[in-house]
Image (cartoon, rainbow, N blue to C red):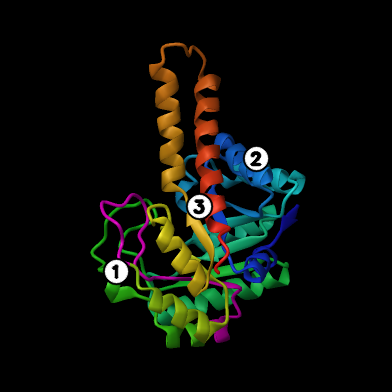
């Protein structure tokens, strides 16, 4: 069942938990994500990140994501993750994506505001939800390190309230200590930032860089107002390890057997993540 982000986040808000967003970089991960959600009977967000477009162009993987969502037994949102260029956002809109993220967080506040307002006006006219971001993570979308110190770029609750009011977005990604990619150590998360932003914006909040957060961290973030959790790196790692095990077994002769092993490993990891995000606070 294809839905937009606003609809799927309303489910999370009603249940006081979070919906997982998983990047579908190919057909194996796409199958893993949708089948995991169906087995658990939970809503899910399928995403194509602009940074991943080099591996599978949106014109190729996008229609498959939309077909899978329409045929799914659970609510599925098809989302453009970290859209940094207007051209990619417009491509997603033309294909029929039901949600787009405009990521202008690296730009000055006024430019971020201007671009977000522009994208929101266009997307809302098409019934498409919009996510934006305030603050910055200490790593880029590919997991590469930057010169950013996490605590220097936490989202300001007051600024977030003004931003949400002026743009009319449907979800806000906030910076509170997480990072993209793999973690060398457990991140130090400032849940006060999440709680204050949730109170000031009255909007569903998004956690980026969620893969390495521990169970307690996820639960506390959800209690404070996180309603969407982006998860990719460790799902991808699970698939890579599944493929490596298949090859090292010496029994595999066909690529499709390796791909199937990767899909099964990713599916198991996605099921674990979805179950964790479905946590209901006491």
> Tag 1, which secondary structure?
helix
Q: Is residue 103 visible?
A: no
Residue 77, given in percent of the width and then of the height, sits at: 66, 56
Q: Under tag 2, what secondary structure?
A: helix
Instruction: Look at the picture and state if 153 lies above or below 158.
Output: above
Bounds of the magenta segment: 164-188
Residue at 45%, 69% (x, y): give it.
104
| Residues at marks 3 and 1, CA–CA distance in whole angstroms | 22 Å
Q: Residue 138 falls in which quadrant of the image?
A: bottom left
Question: On the rendered structure, is 15 left or right of 212?
Answer: right
Mark identifier at residue 35: 2
Residue located beneath label 1 in the image: 150
Foreground mark, 2 or 1, reads 2
Q: Earlier in the sequence, mark 2 or mark 1?
A: 2
Label 3 sits on a secondary structure element that is: strand
Q: Considering the image in quadrants, where does the C terminus appear?
A: bottom right
Which residue in the protein does label 3 denote? 49
Badge nearest the viewer, 3 or 2? 2
Residue 79 in the image, given as x and y percentages of width and height? 60, 57
| Outermost front residue | 282
């Amino acid at each position: 069942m294809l839905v937009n982000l606003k609809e799927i986040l309303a489910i999370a808000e009603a249940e006081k938990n979070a919906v997982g967003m998983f990047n579908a970089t190919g057909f194996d991960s796409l199958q893993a994500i949708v089948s995991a959600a169906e087995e658990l009977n939970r809503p899910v967000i399928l995403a194509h990140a602009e940074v991943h477009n080099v591996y599978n162009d949106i014109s190729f993987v996008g229609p498959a994501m939309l077909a899978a969502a329409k045929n799914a037994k659970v609510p599925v949102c098809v989302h453009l993750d970290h859209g940094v260029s207007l051209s990619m956002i417009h491509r997603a809109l033309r294909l029929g994506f039901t949600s787009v993220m405009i990521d202008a967080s690296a730009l000055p506040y006024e430019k971020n505001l201007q671009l977000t307002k522009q994208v929101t006006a266009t997307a809302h006219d098409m019934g498409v939800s919009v996510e934006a971001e305030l603050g910055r993570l200490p790593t880029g979308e590919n997991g590469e390190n930057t010169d950013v110190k996490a605590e220097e770029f936490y989202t300001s609750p007051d600024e977030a309230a003004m931003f949400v009011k002026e743009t009319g977005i449907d979800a806000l990604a906030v910076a509170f200590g997480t990072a993209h990619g793999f973690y060398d150590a457990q991140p130090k998360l400032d849940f006060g930032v999440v709680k204050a932003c949730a109170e000031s914006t009255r909007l569903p909040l998004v956690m980026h860089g969620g893969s390495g957060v521990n169970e307690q961290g996820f639960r506390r973030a959800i209690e404070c107002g996180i309603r969407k959790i982006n998860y990719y790196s460790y799902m991808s790692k699970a698939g890579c390890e599944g493929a490596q095990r298949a090859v090292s077994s010496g029994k595999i002769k066909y690529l499709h057997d390796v791909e199937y092993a990767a899909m099964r490993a990713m599916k198991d990891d996605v099921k674990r993540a979805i179950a964790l995000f479905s946590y209901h606070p006491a």
